[in-house]
Image (cartoon, rainbow, N blue to C red):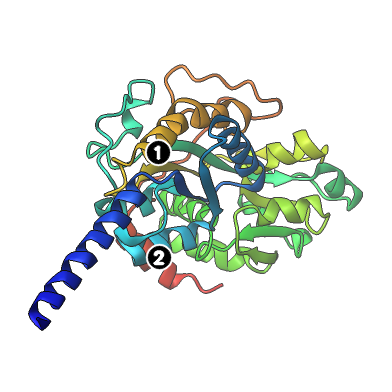
Amino acid sequence: MKKNISLLAAVLLILVIFSCKKEDSNSNTVVIFTSTEDFRTEHIQELLKQQFPKYDITVQVLSTGNHAAKIKAEGQDTEADIILNLETGHLESVKDVLADLSAYNVSDFLDELVPAHHKYLPWDKSSGAVVINREKLTALGLPVPASYEDLLKSEYKGLISMPNPKSSGTGYMFLVSLINAWGEDKAFAYFDSLSENILQFTTSGSGPVNALIQGEVAIGLGMTLTATQAINSRGVPLEMLFFAEGAPSITTGMGIIKGKENRPVVKEVFNFVMTKLVKDDKELYCPEAIFKNQPNNIPNYPKNIPYADMTGVYDTVLKERLLEKWKY
């Protein structure tokens, strides 16, 4: 009798588990992790709501570091179904938990940005710039800097903001670009000297532009996209400078967590991301090319940006070593 009861209990448990999995696979819920800025995230949410009014879609914004750490720690058990705007280096480190996207049409993307394994696809390319407020510099009787070396002059003390490479991909790409241009020893010595003029090493890449907006500094090592948005939406008198070493840059991507790629709702939403969201984002906010023949029609967004050598920026072993040396 007890044996029969145990058998019946086991069967019921299997049925409940199967039922839950079936319900989950047919669920209309989708969770998206992203590291986009607020204004980009709001547009994503608005378009998703318009396109899928009956779906329960959660867009969770995470800093780049937390985004990557969460996926690494949780693997395929993460609550996320889709990830957007995660830096390519981080995507490479978690590619084993990402679904194969070979079935999707990638012919519109620049060939060099599509990885051979197809575990993720491009989301954007973004550059950094030395962003200045000329009006503030003029009011202080200071010249506009013409080189990275100029930023070391004592008259700029306390007037410069930079993202911390340990917490910001923006800060790290500035570090890598100067290492590639000058060599590791000279680049680290440069940042040792620059630290004397830095008001604050910010935790996020948007920090320096926010400090410029608030009038706390006159110069910021920040993102071209964020500076352009401040000019266009808020009328802040900012300018972007690209020195001889070139503009540091980085790419990000989008993907689906392995095991969730066959859920109909996830497939439908990701297809919309590929065909609408990513293209809208490039037309409205970040026009640096990830597509073939991609136009740049955004007012005040620099054209023909001279990109720096970014060799090694996605090397996770190199990054770990370099950040161990960073002491700020």
Percent from the top left, x then y, of residue 265?
40, 38
Left or right, residue 167 beside residue 150: left
Q: Earlier in the sequence, mark 2 or mark 1?
A: 1
Query: The residue under label 2 is which amino acid type?
Result: Leu
Residue situated furthest right in the rendering: 139
Q: Which mark is residue 265?
A: 1
Percent from the top left, x then y, of residue 109?
38, 25
Q: Mark 2 = which residue?
A: 322
Residue situated furthest front in the rendering: 1
Which numbered disc, 2 or 1, marks the residue closer to the eye? 1
- For the N terminus, give its image quadrant: bottom left
Percent from the top left, x then y, of residue 68?
42, 59
Query: The residue under label 1 is which amino acid type?
Result: Val
Q: CA distance from mark 2 to mark 1?
A: 41 Å
Residue at point 38%, 47% (across, down) = 88
Q: Is residue 152 above or below residue 177?
A: below
Depth check: give the residue in front, 70 or 197: 70
Left or right, residue 105 beside residue 84: left
Secondary structure category for the residue under label 1: helix
- For the C terminus, give its image quadrant: bottom right
Evaluate whether residue 62 shows in this view. yes
Residue at point 23%, 36% (across, down) = 116
Depth check: give the residue in front, 243 or 311: 311
Q: Is residue 142 above or below residue 111?
A: below
Depth check: give the residue in front, 292 or 121: 121
Q: Give the crowd class for mark 2: few <14, some 14-19, many >=20 residues within 10 Å.
A: some
Percent from the top left, x then y, of residue 298?
66, 25
